[in-house]
Image (tube, grey):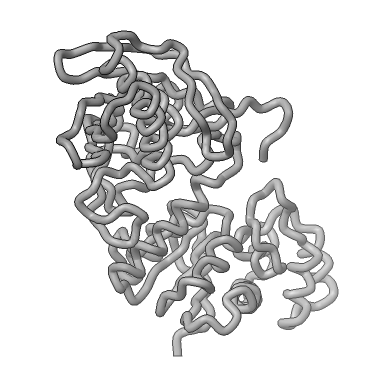
Amino acid sequence: MDTPSLRRGWTTGACATAATRAAAEALITGHFPDPVRIRLPGGSEVGFALAETRLLPNAAEAGVVKDAGDDPDVTHGAMIRASVSRGPTGSGISFAAGEGVGMVTLPGLPIPPGQPAINPVPRRMMAEALAEVSARFGTGPDWAVEISIPGGAALAEKTLNGRLGIVGGLSVLGTTGIVIPFSCSAWIDSIHRGVDVARALSLPHIAAATGRTSEEAVQKLYGLPDAALLDMGDFVGGTLKYIRRHPVPRLTIAGGPAKITKLAQGRLDLHSKRGSVDTAALAEFAREIGADATLTAAIAGANTTLHAFELAAGLPLAQAIAARAHATAQAVLDEAPVALEILIIDRAGGLIARHPPLS
């Protein structure tokens, strides 16, 4: 969540646009504008300092160091480089992936397979900047642009690009040009793109997990391919709402006891800062399945969810929570044609409850 104490930054797409405009102007005039100004999708103009420039006989290169502000972005500090040359007459604007920029290999993404992973909005921003340069200097509208991010292949290993079928490097992203610290928009967007890829591949079963242990457990249980896995984190509500609009045949939601208990309580944001597990609710669940007054009181006073589960040993508390969580999730899916399953996974990766239970 953005707060006054957190500094905003710039998207990879905004940096690529600034580098592209600077290189295009230098190709025509022999001089790099520094700082170079671009227009963001919202209409505001901003300036970027150039970190590197290079003028070649038939091309110009410019680089901008990405400043993501206070957001924990893996590309913060990366060099975003554009190499610009004139294209053949009538060719329009073409984009190529240089070092560290990935290529799309799977369907379902905004960019088709075989194309560099430069998303539609950054492409539009660069095209508009080049059109302004063409109009200002009276040149033709044909340009060839290659975007590079040195070291991007290594950085991409820290992202979900491989799972989405983007190989060889990073994606050039951004819809507003601005990075809002801790907005989680990139994470939610990756969940949506994961669903899109799974649908495009006609996968019959996908799994959304709250963490690595749960994800590994559900993948092992069902033998799912990587493209069928969604790193959902705490965003169960956003995941379910997107799948309601874009159904898949079968969906498994997997998580640890604390996260799934939050879902059972009706919460769709599972982050610990959005409220802790209500042990009183756990105690009520236990009472409904047979806990006596003494045990109910003990569970209500439990220190943690794990402690409550330990106190309730011998009662099917985990199964009851899985059923409640299923009801919450099913209410969000509404009548979407999705076969829903909830799994509760312990810290060792063991399955401790599922709903519906196996018949």
**Nearest the eye: 83 or 106:** 83
Q: Residue at x 44, y 52 (%)?
A: 190
Is 256 displayed left or right of 202 in the figure? Answer: right
| Residue 332 x/y as whole percent | 62, 73
| Residue 147 x/y as whole percent | 28, 31
Q: Is residue 16 visible?
A: no
Say above or below: 345 vs 354.
above
| Residue 282 x/y as whole percent | 74, 68
Say above or below: 45 vs 318.
above
Q: Residue furthest front?
A: 138
Q: Residue at x 25, y 32 (%)?
A: 143
Image quadrant in which you'd find residue 1: top right
Say above or below: 216 vs 94.
below
Q: On the rendered image, what quadrant is the C terminus found in?
A: bottom left
**Nearest the eye: 63 or 188:** 63
Is 98 displayed left or right of 332 in the figure? Answer: left
Q: Residue at x 61, y 59 (%)?
A: 259
Say above or below: 44 vs 176.
above
* Total numbered labels: 0
**Nearest the eye: 269 or 344:** 269
Q: Residue furthest bottom?
A: 359
Image quadrant in which you'd find residue 88: top left
| Residue 335 x/y as whole percent | 57, 84
Q: Is residue 249 visible?
A: yes
Q: Residue at x 71, y 82 (%)?
A: 289
